[in-house]
Amino acid sequence: MDVARGVLHEQYLNRELQVLEFNRRVLAQAEDPTTPLLERLRFLCIVSSNLDEFFEIRVAGLKERINAEDPSIGPDGMSARQVFKRVAESAHRLVEHQYRLLNEEVLPLLAREGIHFLRRSSWNEAQREWIRAYFFRELMPVLTPIGLDPAHPFPRVLNKSLNFAVELAGRDAFGRTSGVAIVPAPRVLPRVIRLPPEVAGGEYGFVFLSSILHAHVGELFAGMHVLGCYQFRVTRNSDLFVDEEEVKDLRAALQGELAHRHFGDAVRLEVADNCSQAMGDFLLEQFRLTPDDLYQVSGPVNLVRLMAIPDQVDRADLKYKPFLPGLPRELSRKSADLFAAIRRSDVLLHHPFQSFQPVVDLIEQAAEDPQVVAIKQTVYRTGADSALMEALVNAARRGKEVTAVVELLARFDEEANMGWAQRLEEAGAHVVYGVVHHKTHAKMAMVVRREDGSLRRYVHLSTGNYHARTARLYTDFGLFTCNEEIGADVNDVFMQLTGLGRAGKLKHLWQSPFTLHQNVLAAIRREAEHAQAGRRARIIAKMNALLEPTVIQALYEASRAGVKIDLIVRGVCALRPGIKGLSHNIRVRSVIGRFLEHDRIFYFYNDGQRDVYLSSADWMERNFFRRIEICFPLLDPRLKRRVIAEGLKPYLKDNVQAWDMTAEGAYLRRRRRRPPYSAQAALLAELAAVPSEPRP
């Protein structure tokens, strides 16, 4: 492809289509025979979970623009209507591939391993009797069939809930002849039921809730004839809207808005493959959807609920081998005093290969330490059950000056964050909700301790959330430091978040929405200047997403100037690599494996200074301009070398889980060479206390 015949919009790929490309790479993990079998099933479910959010947010946004007749054209040169059409075509292909993989490969392989999903047609007499008893004991008392007539209009169907549309013939007790009923499946019911081994004929026999209801739906409509029973699921717009300028209490307004998430505008309808044309059309009409929004699937419509199966099956040979996260050398001594260790030198944690526990220990020690006078922390995603947050509550109860900057608008974690905000306030902490129109996405904690008659700041900065569970699943870096200048910068950011006043100049941190964007651009352009002057120039950047047009243009200019650029972008990338005369010096790769690549690392050679930054921010407009983000340098040369050696080089070397991006936006899996090398497996072998597998 030659840039000479291109126009500006041909330099950018579409975000929504790139999200679907990312999910194809995730689905490839489920296709890979080297992935443990139950993990293959888990990856299938992850794709479904990802697609749920994609439709709830991204497709919902496209539909809002179409309905508003928004004529604007994106950087990719497409209107919302054009994007939606291509998304629908691509998503249908992806879903069809997903279910074909489930039915033709994963389920048969599970059956060979003695893990059976029993279909109605294969039930024996003992199984039918057990299932019938289960229906009357567990299902019948909680089901509420709704016959449709003028007194019973089509019900409000909850977002992503399992429902059944039933076609009927005959008259009921009141002489009504309505031909359709809706049966919602209560969320308290399991979607997959495990049969006793003596009934299943083996240790692991499962039956879908939908199969049980299909078999006994006639019991709900005495004296009528069931012509058909079809499972369906509707996905709704789940993006919350709170006018932060109008509301006086953001938490109260958000609590009211959360209830509406279950009943937003419909954006997708999933039905079983046995659904009749007439019923499909009827449901589309009820939800005001079009045929492009209909996904007819060969299997359960709520595939994400199969995520529970690996945890119910005790087969270690079909799962990833467990591992025990390690500790850096500085913290390897038993009963180590964290404050003393941080005073000796900065400490870097590389999750999940190294433990998240020291982060929890910092807050727990701070809560108990009489010398600690204050703790400040940002809260974005922590989970509903968090030892770290309990430590923060305990610190407030013990009289520490605790300040929590809680982001109430962390998508799908709003309810958990509101709960923590309330508990912290009740314990006596100062709780603030950040800045209007700017999500607080920065990951910072600061402990102020009295030592030798003066106050010292201890800081933890991270690329990832204060969430112990995801710290076992996501790759992230966290830094402990008591560097006075970095501590002063972090304190200034907290002062901005809790108080009022103009942003001051920070010594080391780059901060959104003030300096991060301009500093990233300046660093890229500086590399271009070095290249133009004949000096060595190099950029390596690792992130989740690259979308911001100005940064992409700066990278194109640097490529033209001769800068060698490697971009490790796990998810969405709008930049087109490898275009002659534009991006021939840029390579883009994505690594998809056991762990979700989540860290953000920015390396600039800078004439031999080898600047290394870690950040909470991707290179996206929202991160640069609509969020509070920080980007922090590694000042210790030893830690700088570690990040290069652990966070960048292995991912450039990976030939097992790496995908190379083409100029057209497609991804080609790197050909496995000898010897095979997986970055994640190598890091587990090097850093974990008990590696799950030998070094590749």
Image: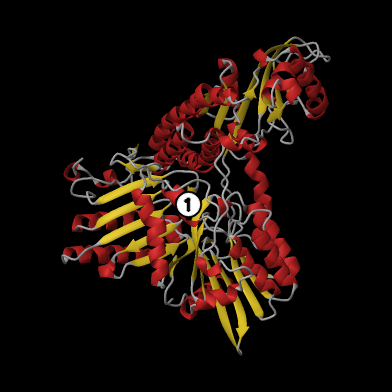
Q: Is residue 273 above or below residue 492?
A: above
**Foreground pick, 330 / 161:** 330
**Which residue sits furthest front?**
694
Query: Is residue 75 rendered to the left or right of residue 472?
Result: left
**Foreground pick, 283 / 404:** 404
Query: Is residue 395 rendered to the left or right of residue 639?
Result: right
Name the quadrant of the N terminus.
top left
**Foreground pick, 35 / 483:** 35
Tell me where residue 408 appears, x and y as whole percent.
61, 58
Name the quadrant of the C terminus.
top left
Q: Is residue 570 above or below residue 234?
A: below
Question: Which residue occupies 46% across, 79% down?
Answer: 485
Tell me where residue 439 appears, x and y as whole percent.
53, 60
Q: Amino acid at mark 1?
A: Ala
Tell me where residue 368 appears, x and y as whole percent.
70, 73
The secondary element bearing badge 1 is classed as helix
Asked whether residue 160 appears in the rendered view, the answer is: no
Q: How is the image coloured?
A: secondary structure
Question: Which residue occupies 60% across, 18% down?
Answer: 279
